[in-house]
Image (cartoon, rainbow, N blue to C red):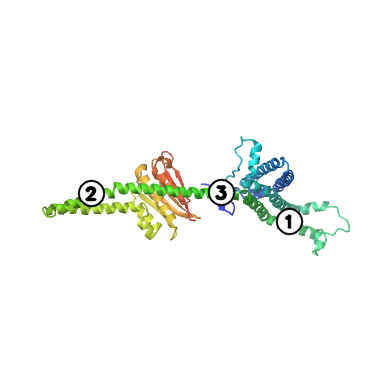
Amino acid sequence: METNDTLSTGSGRLQGRSGGFFTRLGQDTLYAMTAMPLGLAGFVLTVVGVALGLGTLVIWIGIPILGATVLASSGLAQLERLRLRKLQGRVFPAVHYRGGGPSQNPWVRALRRLRDPQSWLDLVWGVVGFVSGLVAFVVVTVWWAASLTGLTYWFWERWIPRSDDDEPLAELLGLGDGRTADVTLTTVIGLVALVSLPFVVRAVAWLHASLASVLLNSRAELLSEVRRAEGAREAAHAAEAVSLRRLERDIHDGPQQRLVRMDMDLGRARRQLADNPDGAAEILAHLQQHTRETVNELRALSRGIAPPLLVDRGLAVALDELAARSAVEVDLHRDLPAALPPEVETAVYFTVSEALTNAAKHAGVDRARVRVVVDRDAVVAEVTDAGQGGAHPGKGQGLAGLQQRLTAVGGTLDVHSPNGGPTTVRARVPLT
C-alpha cells in the first residue's frame, strides 16, 4: 500500500514527493530556474504599482491603482503556491482573501483587498521573492554549467582559440602547464560540481520555498490552527454535554430506580420486623442482592467516565482487560510506551471499546483484530472485523460520539466499511 508521509515544518508541511533521485533533482532545478523570471515580474509589478499608487493618492486614481496592484500580486502569489505544491511537495491550507466572490465587481474586490493583511504580505513577497529567486537562479545556473562544461571540457577544449600569451587556469594556480594539466583541473572541478549539485540545488530551492511559505502561507496556517482549536473546543463541549446527558439518563433509569425500590423495601422490612421476622429477613436478603446489582451497575457506569484500571495501571493493561471481557474473541497487538497523556489513553480506550461493542452488536462476528501502536507523534488504534459492513458515523450515536470525542483531543476517525465487509475503524490521536 502506498504511503504519503509528511514532515512538519515551521510553515506548512513538507510532503514526501514521489519519484526517484533524478525526478527530485529535476523538480528542484525547474523550481529554482523559474523563480527568477517570476520574481522579476512580481518585483516590477510591486515597485511600479505601489510607487504609482502612492504617488497618485492625492487624487482619486491612487487607491484603485493600489487595489489593482494588490489583486495582481495575489495572482502571482497563487501561482507560487501552486509551484510549492507541485514542485516542492509543500502542503498547506487554502488561502482565503477578503473581497467577496469572483462574481463581484472587480474594482470592489480590488479595493476590499487593501484591507486584507495577506494581500500586503503578497506585496512583500514580490520584493523578497525576486531577491531569493535571483540567488537561486544564479547558483543553480553556475553549478549546472560547472558540472556540464567541466566534464565535457576534454572534448571541446581543442576548439578554443588561444594565443601565445594565454595562461590556462592550471598554470595560473601553479599546477603545471600544458593541455593535460588544464583538462585534468577542469574535469576535477566538474566532478566536484556534479557531486555537490543535488545538495546545492536542494538547498537553494528549499531556501526560496521556505521564504515563500512564511510570507504566503504562514498566516493561513495560523488561522487554520485557530479554527481547529476552536473546533476541538466545541467538540469537547459537545462530547461532554452528550456524556453528561447519557450518564444522567443511565443513573435515572438504573441505580436511581433501584435505590428507590430499596428504600421502599427497607420500610416494609422495618414494619414487619416485630410481627413477621421471617418476612423481614426475606426482604433483607432481596435487598442484599439489589445492593450488589446496584454496585455492579454503578461500576459499569463509571467505566464510561474513566475505567479504574485505565487510571491506575495505564492503557496497555486496560486494553488487555477489555479484550479479555469482550463479547467477541480479540486478537490484540499492542506496542505502547509505559506512560501516555491521560486524554490520549482515554480516547484510544473508548475507540477500541466502542468498535468492539459495534462488532459484537451489529457485525455478527465472533472474532475481531485490534492493533494499537505509536506511529511517530501519534497513537494509532485499528479495530477490524469481517462482518457485514455498512458502518458509518452518520448512522448512529456510537461512532458519531466517538468521532466527537477524538476531535476534542485533535484526533481523527476513519471508518472503512464497504457493504459485505470487512470493517476497519482507525483512530489517530496525536501525542502533543
Residue at 30% of width from left, 53% of height from top? Answer: 298
Q: Residues within 10 Å of mark 3 (few under 14, many from 20)?
A: few
Residue at 29% of width from left, 48% of height from top? Answer: 254
What residue would you read off at disc 3? 223
Q: Amino acid type of disc 1?
A: Gly
The alpha-carbon separation of the residues under discs 2 and 1 comes to: 93 Å
Could you tell which of marks 3 and 2 lies nearer the N-terminus? 3
Q: Position of residue 1 (x, y in %)?
A: 51, 47
What residue would you read off at disc 2? 261
Q: Position of residue 201 (x, y in %)?
A: 68, 53
Judged left or right of residue 148, residue 309 is left
Instruction: Tell which of 26 and 212 is nearer to you.
Output: 212
Instruction: Tell which of 170 and 411 is nearer to you.
Output: 411
Q: Amino acid type of disc 2?
A: Arg
**Can residue 328 be seen by looking at this rendering?**
no
Q: Position of residue 7 (x, y in %)?
A: 56, 53
Q: Amino acid type of disc 3?
A: Leu
Judged left or right of residue 10, residue 383 is left
Instruction: Tell which of 284 and 37 is nearer to you.
Output: 284
The alpha-carbon separation of the residues under discs 3 and 2 comes to: 56 Å
What residue would you read off at disc 1? 190
Q: Position of residue 320 (x, y in %)?
A: 37, 55
Instruction: Tell which of 48 and 367 is nearer to you.
Output: 48
Q: Is residue 173 above or below residue 306?
A: below
**Can residue 291 be seen by looking at this rendering?**
yes
Closest to the camera, between mark 2 and mark 1, is 2
| Callout 3 secondary element | helix
Q: Residues within 10 Å of mark 2 (few under 14, many from 20)?
A: some
| Callout 2 secondary element | helix
